[in-house]
C-alpha cells in the first residue's frame, strides 16, 4: 500500500499530522519531500522584493536625479545677515 501523509519533525521524532492505522512495530520506507513555508515575519521583506523593478523603464532614473539636484540648487530661503 502506498500513501502520502503530512508529518512534522519535532524533537527528533517524525509525527503524523493525519490519522494513520498501522500496527505497533511495523516498519516503513519513508521518502522525504521538504515543504518550505515562509514564516510570517518575512512577509514584508518578501513582498518588497517581489515589487523590485516595478518602476524599471517607466522613469529615467538619471534624469530624475539631475532634476532633484537642480531643484536643490535653487534656494527660496532669504539670505541670512549677521
Image (cartoon, rainbow, N blue to C red):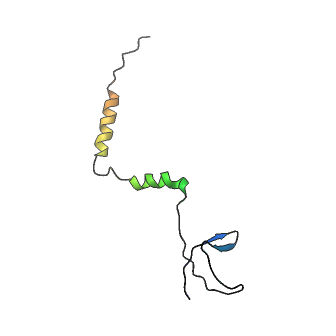
Toward the viewer: 71 or 55? 55
Instruction: Please state which of residues 53 and 42 is positioned toward the viewer in this rendering.
Output: 42
Q: Point out residue 29 in the picture as x, y percentages from the top left corner.
A: 61, 86
x and y, in percent, of residue 34 in the image? 55, 72
The residue under the point 50% across, 54% down is 43
Q: How many marks?
A: 0
Residue 21's image quarter? bottom right
Look at the picture and state if 15 lies above or below 71: below
Query: In this image, 33 relative to 14: left or right?
Result: left
Quarter of the rendering occupied by the C terminus: top left
Q: Is residue 27 above or below residue 60?
A: below
Q: Position of residue 28 (x, y in %)?
A: 63, 86
Q: Is residue 64 above or below residue 47?
A: above
Residue at image point 54% right, 76% down: 33
Q: Residue at x 64, y 71 (%)?
A: 9
Asked if residue 10 lies left or right of residue 62, the reply is right
Q: Nearer the viewer, residue 15 or 44?
A: 15
Residue shown at 53%/67% (left/top)?
A: 36
Amino acid at each position: 500500500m502506498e500513501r502520502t501523509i503530512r508529518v512534522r519533525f519535532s524533537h527528533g521524532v517524525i509525527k503524523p499530522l493525519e490519522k494513520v492505522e498501522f500496527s505497533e512495530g511495523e516498519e516503513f520506507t519513508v521518502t522525504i519531500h521538504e515543504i518550505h513555508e515562509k514564516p510570517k515575519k518575512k512577509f514584508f521583506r518578501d513582498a518588497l522584493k517581489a515589487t523590485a523593478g516595478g518602476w524599471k523603464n517607466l522613469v529615467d532614473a538619471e534624469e530624475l536625479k539631475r532634476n532633484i539636484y537642480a531643484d536643490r540648487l535653487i534656494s527660496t530661503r532669504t539670505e541670512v545677515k549677521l
